Image (cartoon, helix red, strand yellow):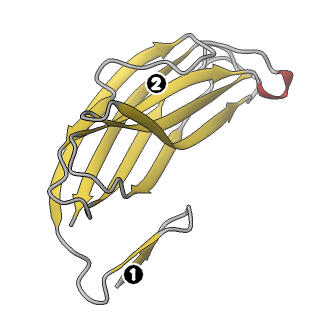
Amino acid sequence: MTIHFGDSTSISSGGALGKVANMSTSQFGATISSSSYQAISGHSVTLTPSSSSSKFLVMIESAGTQENGASNSGFRITRYKHTSATTTEIHTGNAYANPGGIRSLVPMFSNVFDQPNTTEQLTYAVDFQKQNSGGLGTANFGAYGSITAIEIT
């Protein structure tokens, strides 16, 4: 069996896919007011891989509203390795909100496949920022959702 992901990676097992060894979910909510990436309290999940060959499926879902209808929003998913104290950005994305009114919806979803090649404790996190793409200006926005990491061995 093979599962293909949008970033051109895949899992191929030649048979059964493997087993879920660990899973963690965290819910978050915050007002995003910075043009720099902003960490959110409760926006992360921490797991320790059972094997250096473990793979992780990291999923975020977020919905929120812009304070006005002419702004963009961005997010990134990072992986922090505790022992080596290194952070790696593993995915970025953005959302556009300009329906011509206030309180525009800002949906952001992502599924990322990661293979960290370590048994160090890991923390996956999602950070947000407001953006000014296309000269629309920036507006604060609320982001609410969850991040889930699933270890596959």
Q: What element carries label 1?
A: strand
Q: Is residue 94 above or below residue 119?
A: above
The x, y position of residue 67, in whole percent, is 61, 13
Tell which of 133 and 21 is nearer to you.
21
Residue at (26% x, 64% y) in the render = 53
The x, y position of residue 64, in whole percent, is 50, 26
Tell me if mark 1 has few (under 14), some (14-19) or many (20+) residues whose alpha carbon lies within 10 angstroms of its own.
few
Which label was assigned to residue 2? 1
- Taking 42 as reference, is 74 left or right? right
Q: Is mark 2 on a helix, strand or loop?
A: strand
Residue kind at label 1, given as amino acid type = Thr
Residue at the spot of label 2: 143
The quarter of the picture where the N terminus appears is bottom left
Q: Which of marks 1 and 2 is in front?
A: 1
State the CA–CA distance, disc 1 to disc 2.
33 Å
Q: In this view, does 141 lie above or below 85?
A: above
Q: Quadrant of residue 25?
A: top left
Tell which of 58 and 98 is nearer to you.
58
Residue at (48% x, 48% y) in the render = 110
Tell which of 106 and 30 is nearer to you.
30
Residue at (47% x, 32% y) in the render = 63
Residue at (49% x, 66% y) in the render = 5
For the residues labelled 1 and 2, say whether their Cβ atoms are less than 8 Å apart.
no
Q: In this view, does 4 lie above or below 84?
A: below
Q: Is residue 7 visible?
A: yes
The quarter of the picture where the C terminus appears is bottom left
Tell which of 10 and 139 is nearer to you.
10
- Taking 14 as reference, is 141 left or right? right
Outermost right residue = 135
Q: Which of marks 1 and 2 is nearer the N terminus?
A: 1
Q: Is residue 65 visible?
A: no
The x, y position of residue 36, in whole percent, is 59, 17
